[in-house]
Image (spheres, grey):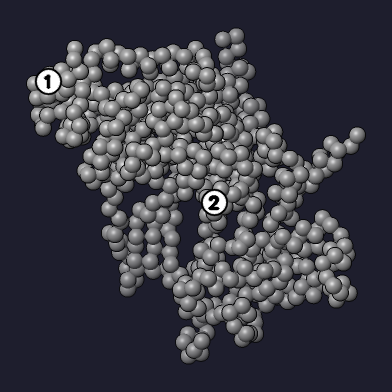
């Protein structure tokens, strides 16, 4: 077949039944790497704030993205407990880094947010409606674990009776360009949690990188609409079935290698987490000596919780001016590792580091299941990498499992 | 200040200086517009950094900057305590002895002899110690210098009769909230952020520098674990001792750790 035969045209079976003509939901097209810039331009022209991975301060972080040239082409990240280093790799593509310290949480559930503004006039309080308008967000480069983390935070902020208005507003307009990972860091264990390495759902567009081009899966009507606009600038070529299979195979190969804990293209073996019966395993071991042991290493510094894409604790304070007549209601990220987090009636009910580490880990991997019907862990490994002393959630669970009185001989 | 405007109802505030660089008092002056707002609500009866006028006590709130480093200071703080209903100390010097407390590990006579042309004119104690070692203190506000926002919040809290909003978490929480990439993890720089109380807004790591512990030890922390990890990653123990024994080196948690590092170092040096 000649390549031109596959240019998506009005006669193409992939054409959506409605709209201006573009690839349909579920279809795949090729995006040459040069189309990343027009893709960014289309999103920005649509009034979106575009966020994408970029190298800054020794890591790949999410930042406002205007130029495709700012994407981290040729960079990979070496990660281990308490260790992250960028390395230049001439073979690496646009997205061969894995995950950095930032996640979607930084944008949907921002670290600081003014959620109310109140004035006292003549002894009466009045709420001022002056919260800033935010443009819709488009995030390029999110991974399977990021999407899983988003789905978990959706349950927290949108799933209950109380819907978080700010999160809801940002989530409704969020546009996601996902990427299927081609490599795993030593701290990755998404294959254990079922969250990756492929981005399976929840995206508008999903890219699988090949030399010089991306196979792009259309995940939503909004994704299709964006490609329709892109198609006005550049011709799009549909992927053949065998090309789609090759893209899927790339993710499957990585997942199988992670399961086999093989070295992936020169990488150290990824971690793994045995999640079988994990809820009961942890509940049955609340007095396990490992909690005291990990407390000799844990700093209670809060890093694991703040880099976690699903941790959602916050603290709300009313910040008054000196007169006490103008009050801003400020919300900021909080952490179960601080004494203040569990302070009641003048004292902290979790005064030891052991009790705080146990609270975090049992909530993340066990209590979360009861509370939200899902584990709170996506296997992204951020808590391992960004722990200043390299405490490893998979190692802690394995230690408890190895010596659990309930699992002996298993 | 106009005597006819609410002369009796305003709380009276006094600001004192002991052994210090005046930087914390400057933070109060730097609060600019909010300082004027403050002056509307309190009578600033003594603040030599701002005015040479001193109105006699007693005062409702005394703010003390600086450490006790002379015999005269040691006496003076007793009168300050008697003059003030609430006594709050501000800054590393007042709350932990300050950078000048480094002399607590040395010999005062040697320092005096090597620094001053006429050592006989120097009358200093052998140690620099926090105010709370000498008189009861109602609240300690950490920092080198203190944060103007926290300082004004403290004064506002005293005026409104509520607990001051001073975080007890580590500097890491502030780095993560501002999106700063961890300098310890991504660059291998030994940083005191994980064991230091927040309050500064995590300024230094945002400029690729380690945290120097200006706000003193965090409430619940584990210095041994952190320094052990840094040492395993190749930081010499001597450098770690110096890092911990810095601005707030005489704060109990930092003091114990630098002493432990030093004694372990000397033990290791034995044949």
Residue in the image at 17% along x and 22% along y: A7
Between residue A223 and residue A335, name the one nearer to us: A223
Residue A161: % across, % down = 31, 39
Task: Please identify the quadrant where the C terminus of chain A is shown.
Answer: top right
The residue tagged 1 is: A12
Between residue B171 and residue A44, name the one nearer to us: A44
Does dot 1 land on a helix, a strand or a loop? loop
The residue tagged 2 is: B207
Residue in the image at 45% along x and 70% along y: A322
Task: Please identify the quadrant where the N terminus of chain A is shown.
Answer: top left
For this orientation, the residue located farthest to the right is B271
User: Does the CB distance between marks 1 and 2 fall below 8 Å?
Assistant: no
Disc 1 sits on a residue from what chain?
Answer: A
- Note whether residue A195 is visible: no
Number of other residues with Cα within 10 Å of mark 2, as a class: few under 14, some 14 to 19, many 20 or more: few
For this orientation, the residue located farthest to the bottom is B4
Residue in the image at 34% along x and 62% along y: A118
Give the image quarter of residue A103.
Answer: top left
Give the image quarter of residue B264.
Answer: top right
Does dot 2 land on a helix, a strand or a loop? helix
Compared to residue A25, the image places residue A63 above or below, namely: below
Residue in the image at 80% along x and 75% along y: B72
Taking the image as shown, residue B214 lies to the left or right of residue A126, namely right
Residue B236: % across, % down = 73, 40
> Which numbered marker is on residue B128?
none
Taking the image as shown, residue B247 lies to the left or right of residue A348, namely right
């Amino acid at each position: 077949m000649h390549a031109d035969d596959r240019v998506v045209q009005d006669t193409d079976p992939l054409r959506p039944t409605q709209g201006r003509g573009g690839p349909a939901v579920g279809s795949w097209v090729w995006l040459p790497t040069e189309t990343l810039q027009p893709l960014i331009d289309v999103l920005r022209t649509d009034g979106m704030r575009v966020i994408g991975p970029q190298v800054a301060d020794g890591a790949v972080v999410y930042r406002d993205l205007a130029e495709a040239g700012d994407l981290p082409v040729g960079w990979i990240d070496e990660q281990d407990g308490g260790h992250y280093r960028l390395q230049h790799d001439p073979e690496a593509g646009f997205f061969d880094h894995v995950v950095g310290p930032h996640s979607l949480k930084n944008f949907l559930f921002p670290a600081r947010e003014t959620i109310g503004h109140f004035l006292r006039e003549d002894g009466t309080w009045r709420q001022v409606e002056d919260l800033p308008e935010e443009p819709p967000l488009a995030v390029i480069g999110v991974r399977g674990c990021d999407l899983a983390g988003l789905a978990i935070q959706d349950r927290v902020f949108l799933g209950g009776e109380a819907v978080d208005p700010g999160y809801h507003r940002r989530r409704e307009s969020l546009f996601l360009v996902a990427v299927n990972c081609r490599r795993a860091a030593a701290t990755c264990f998404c294959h254990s949690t079922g969250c990756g390495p492929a981005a399976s759902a929840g995206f508008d567009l999903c890219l699988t990188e090949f030399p010089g081009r991306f196979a792009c899966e259309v995940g939503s009507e909004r994704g299709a609409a964006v490609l329709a606009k892109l198609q006005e600038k550049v011709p799009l070529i549909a992927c053949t079935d065998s090309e789609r299979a090759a893209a899927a195979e790339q993710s499957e190969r990585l997942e199988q290698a992670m399961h086999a804990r093989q070295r992936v293209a020169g990488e150290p073996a990824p971690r793994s987490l045995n999640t079988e019966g994990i809820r009961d395993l942890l509940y049955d071991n609340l007095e396990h000596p490992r909690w005291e042991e990990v407390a000799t290493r844990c700093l209670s510094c809060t890093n694991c919780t703040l880099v976690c894409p699903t941790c959602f604790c916050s603290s709300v304070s009313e910040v008054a001016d000196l007169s006490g007549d103008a009050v801003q209601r400020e919300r900021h990220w909080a952490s179960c590792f601080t004494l203040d987090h569990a302070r009641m009636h003048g004292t902290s009910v979790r005064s030891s580091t052991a009790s705080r580490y146990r609270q975090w880990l049992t909530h993340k991997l066990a209590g979360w299941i009861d509370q939200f019907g899902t584990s709170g862990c996506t296997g992204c490994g951020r808590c391992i990498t960004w722990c200043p002393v390299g405490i490893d959630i998979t190692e802690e669970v394995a230690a408890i499992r190895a010596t659990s009185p309930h699992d002996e001989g298993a | 200040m106009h005597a006819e405007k609410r002369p009796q109802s305003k709380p009276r505030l006094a600001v004192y200086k002991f052994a210090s660089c005046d930087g914390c008092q400057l933070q109060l002056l730097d609060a600019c517009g909010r300082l004027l707002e403050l002056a509307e609500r309190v009578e600033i009866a003594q603040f030599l950094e701002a005015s040479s006028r001193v109105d006699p006590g007693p005062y409702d709130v005394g703010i003390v900057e600086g450490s006790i480093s002379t015999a005269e200071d040691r006496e003076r703080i007793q009168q300050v305590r008697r003059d003030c209903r609430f006594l709050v100390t501000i800054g590393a010097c007042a709350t932990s002895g300050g950078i000048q407390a480094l002399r607590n590990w040395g010999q005062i006579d040697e320092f005096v002899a090597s620094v001053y042309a006429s050592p006989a004119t120097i009358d200093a104690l052998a140690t620099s110690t926090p105010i709370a070692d000498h008189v009861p203190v109602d609240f300690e506000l950490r920092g080198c210098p203190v944060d103007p926002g926290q300082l004004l919040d403290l004064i506002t809290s005293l005026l409104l009769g509520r607990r001051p909003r001073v975080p007890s978490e580590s500097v890491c929480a502030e780095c993560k909230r501002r999106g700063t990439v961890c300098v310890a993890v991504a660059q291998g720089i030994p940083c005191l952020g994980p064991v230091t109380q927040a309050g500064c807004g995590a300024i230094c790591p945002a400029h690729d520098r380690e945290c120097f512990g200006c706000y003193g030890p965090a409430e619940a922390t584990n210095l041994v674990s952190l320094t052990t990890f840094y040492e395993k990653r190749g930081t010499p123990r001597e450098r770690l001792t110096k890092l911990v024994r810095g601005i707030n080196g005489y704060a109990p948690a930092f003091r114990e750790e630098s002493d432990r590092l030093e004694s372990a170092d000397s033990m290791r040096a034995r044949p």
